[in-house]
Amino acid sequence: MTANADAKALEPVAVTIASTNGEHATTNGENASTNTDTVVPVTRCCHCTCKDTHPETNGTKSKSKSKSKSKKSKSKSKKSKKSKRKSKSKKDESSDSESDSSSESESESEAEDGEETKDEDGDEKADEEKKVLAPIGSVSEIKNIYRSPKDDDGNWTWVDKYPEDVEEAAENAETETFAVLVRNVKSNDSRKKLEAHSIVIQSPWLKKALSEILDEYPGVAPELERLEFEAPFKPFVHRWQELVKYREREDLEDKTKEHLKLLYDTLQYEIGDSIKAFEDYVKNSVITFKHLWMIFQPGKPVVAMYKGPLTAFELAETEYMSNNCGSFLRTKCDCVDYGGKNFGRYQEIIDIPEFIGTKKITSLSVYPLVFHAKRDEVVETLTKRGQLFESLAGHHYKSYSGKAITWDREGKEVPIQVSGRIIIDIDSFNRFSPYYNTRYLSDWSAKDLERLGKYKDEHGLNDKGEFRLTPYHHLLARSRTRGYSLKLKKWLDFYIEQVAEITWNNNAFDKLVLPADQKELILAFSESQLEGSTFDDVISGKGKGIICLLSGPPGVGKTLTAEAVAENLKAPLYSLGSGDVGSDPWEVERTLQSILELVARWNAILLLDECDVFLEARSTHDLERNKVVSIFLRTLEYYEGIMFMTTNRIDNIDAAFQSRIHVSLEYPDLTSAARRSIWKNFLRGATIKSGLTDGDIEQLSELKLNGRQIKNVLKTAQLLAARRKSPTLDKKFIDTVLAIEKKRPGAPSTLTHYL
């Protein structure tokens, strides 16, 4: 038993006993009524099962206490004799005739006192001599000690002496016979002397009624032997209308009606004024900060514009709190989330700062769903979003456009604009994200399991072994999910509503300017790899991947080849530059292992762009780079996916790479025919209608521009045409851009002759 618990056990408690006839008997000070027929109950220890029954010692027998009592009685007799002697002395002063007899009496008294003192001292010495401590823990009894009163500094200790100011416990076998117990304390309300501290329901008829009235109310178990409610009696405030309606039922037993009336009258006295004020506030859709907790019923859905769009939660609990910024009501709200392996609940904290006067309920940072003006529409919208949330469990390749969330070094959320392809994968986020903000989920509640089980039965999912969220859980689903942006190379939190299906470019590979046999060879390797066709090495796990090396000058289509293959196979393309893996050998190995594991999990194509630093031949004077090359060689050996590597310097590749490369394609400089095809392909994809003639395109194809340069020229020309509000992309806009490009250092010499 703790110190606090002992303190409460020793404090006198005022108890009001509600009987079936409506009479109350109190034991609180001057209001206490005396019942001479009442038998003083036997007091037992509150923390054990001992059978000692001394009220004075709280059920403990002790020889030392009986000795103490005898000593106290002797001490009292001694004091009384001394007082007698003093009174005799005063009488002697007033009467000389009696002085002789008084002296004789005093002598006799002193002699007697001396003899008694000697007897007491002798007894104490004898007791000390006889007192021999038993071995530790060998006495088959229970020893009670008690908390001492606090001193001036607020300190206390455990003592052997039984507290003299402790009264008999008010709750006993007799009080258990009453339907309702009301524990009272002194009221701070000027209109009341006492107010209820707590109410104990003992009536089985009331418990049965409350099992319906308070059905599914969190934290209430009507089947308990002692069903206790503490002020301000939140369950009854939130279910007041249910209580009123239940009392009006005509099929109730007389005993149930009587006991319900007792409870109703008690609650009406205690919280009737608050309920009346609350109902008036709700009628006008406003609330005060004092009564704010009343609108939040645990277990009911609430909505909030929390960290983005409108989101629904299930309210867990509320609590008034304060800090240096002032007072506020803290709400703990549960949402449904996916942790990477399974679904569960996650709790968010939403605070409502203190406000003066009344405030519109719908203007609060969080409020019950029932108060929303378009409740049905909100439920439908959020339920559909929850269905999409459930469908994104696992890993998925999607398109995204809009705001997403990243985090700064302190873990604070930072919005970021994202556009492009993404991978939804919460499990990988938890494993590989550098942000330490994994959302740990709690298990389903008993009510959740009941809902889920019933839903599975109704939809025949038990036989299939499938797991499905219920519409209610869809409503509570989180508004965001986590994954990876392939373009930004960042782990982010994505808004569900911005996630979309990918619009594939089915003509991407056809537009690739390559010899037909090379295109066919690349497709053959890629398709067989994704379909699972294998030709393994002798050693298990080795040689399962496809490595393609694309070499040639910049802008001839090396990167575009990898992009076109990924688009044709509808697979993610993970682009990686040498600068993305670092330079330290340990860092390179760790980064490559993580990336290759992700690529394999996502069934993606890996593009290692401009990888000369990894492929360059090793030398004796650069040991650090030699380590990096060795790590990369070992990584390639056990890679199981499709990898495209691009380089501009094929002549300087380390010899060890030659046997590890399955396909090696060299891209020559573009011919005029190839450039003509590139100009036409980009013009078809332009946002502004082309105004160029075939002659214009033929003239432009003679310029020795690579594919990337042609793309940049057309992109800039489109911006210029849009700025001048031209309906077509005419050659004059392209000529303007080329004139500017001509002045740039390193510009193609053909531009000089063209312009």
Image (cartoon, rainbow, N blue to C red):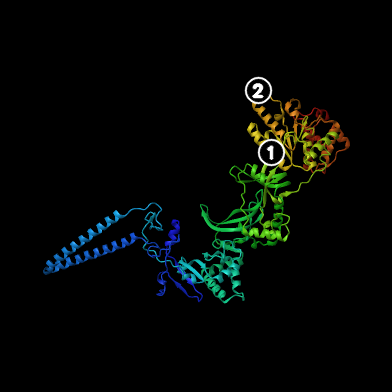
- When asked about the image quadrant of residue 483, the answer is top right
Separation of residues labelled 2 and 1 (CA atoms): 30 Å
Where is the C terminus found, in terms of image quarters? top right
Left or right: 63 with respect to 371? left
Name the residue nearer the viewer: 47 or 646.
47
How far from the left and from the top, in percent, is residue 119? 23, 59
The x and y percentages for residue 587 are 64, 34
Which comes sooner in the sequence, label 2 or label 1? Answer: 1
Q: Which mark is residue 621?
A: 2
| Residue occupying image coordinates x 65% and y 36% | 590
Query: Which quadrant of the figure has residue 116?
Result: bottom left
Marking on residue 211: none
Residue at mark 1: 595
- Can residue 597 be seen from the camera position used here? yes
Q: Farthest top residue?
A: 620
> Residue 277 at what x, y percent from top left?
56, 67
- SS type, badge 2: loop
Residue type at tag 1:
Ile
- 723 vs 556: above or below: below
